[in-house]
Image (cartoon, rainbow, N blue to C red):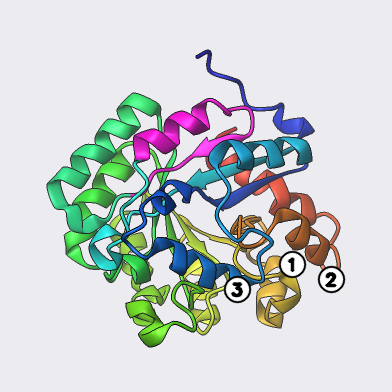
Amino acid sequence: MTQLALLNPDDLVAIDIHTHAEEPCGCHGDDGYDDFQAKMAEYFKSPNKHPPTVPETAAYYRAKKIAAVIFPVDAERETGFRRYNNDEMIELARQNADVLIPFASIDPHKGKIGVREARRLIADYGIKGFKFHPTMQGFYPNDRMAYPLYEAIQEGGAIALFHTGQTGVGSGMPGGNGMRLKYSNPMHIDDVAVDFPDLKIILAHPSFPWQEEALSVATHKPNVYIDLSGWSPKYFPPILVRYINSMLQDKMLFGSDWPVITPDRWMADFAKLEIRDEIRPKVLKNNARKLLGI
């Protein structure tokens, strides 16, 4: 199939830096993934009771003239949910490359085989980034176990995107479905930013209850950015809004957390925030363009 070109960036309304591709996991009736997704939809009051397919996601974003970074989450070891194969997801995204920008996901516990996969995905597909979810994957981001994988990502010029803060994953389920929040304190990623100064890092989400830690790391480390996904902007804490409007205006990125939060909902609430007019286009598109090189 002929590779499509990304829609003219100048014509895009926004670039959503944080969307999920998860639906193939739900094809397996024995791993609990459907029950897990139902709880997630309930927690986020999502209109989608089961994750949309990658082509459905592309159609939504195409209609809105929004480009989207899309990725799976490889958390097989910790959750028992079979992962969405990176190659499968990437191929589907490439068929919709006018609006979708694929990132991959590799559980760092996979060691050398994960490092080889990362190098292959960068070489074969030109993958621009990798998603990590410390709580779902059960690791501290500064665990040296993960460093060979970060090294491969840094050498390939790709981005490392880390979930930070509390998560809706497992919320309300017995024992939080085994999810431990401690792994996602953004201060653990400060070590990664020090040890890999050429690695572009995104701290995903307003990092409750560690918002000030996230702002501190992003302010102090030039290679660290923040995406604003996973929360409706009407719930952003005042200190986050203050930093969007000032010191971190060039490092804040629009993200929705699709499909649990839609861009429509996020952008409508963002429009009501007291954000300076000249900063809005930076958050919605321009900062992401620079970071992604588009």
Residue 199 point in image, percent of width and height: 37, 49
Looking at the rendering, which quadrant does residue 194 occupy? bottom left
Residue 42 point in image, percent of width and height: 60, 73
Residue 207 appears in the rendering: yes
State yes or no: residue 52 in magenta.
no
Residue at 51% across, 74% down: 168
Other residues around mark 3 within 10 Å, as few (<14) / some (14–19) / many (≥20): some
Residue 254 point in image, percent of width and height: 66, 55
Dots 3, 2 in contact, CB < 8 A: no
**Residue closer to the observer: 73 or 220:** 73
Front disc: 1 or 3? 3
Residue type at numbered disc 1: Asn
Which range is magenta? Answer: 86-105
Q: Secondary structure at mark 1?
A: loop
Q: Quadrant of the C terminus?
A: top right
Q: Secondary structure at mark 2?
A: loop
Front disc: 3 or 2? 3
Q: Which residue is mark 2?
A: 274
Q: Which residue is mark 3?
A: 42
Dots 2, 1 in contact, CB < 8 A: yes
Counting every numbered tag in the picture gives 3
Q: Which residue is mark 1?
A: 245
Residue at 20% across, 44% down: 115
Q: Secondary structure at mark 3?
A: helix
Residue type at numbered disc 3: Glu
Residue 279 appears in the rendering: no
Q: Is residue 88 above or below residue 115?
A: above
Give left or right: position of 271 versus 143: right
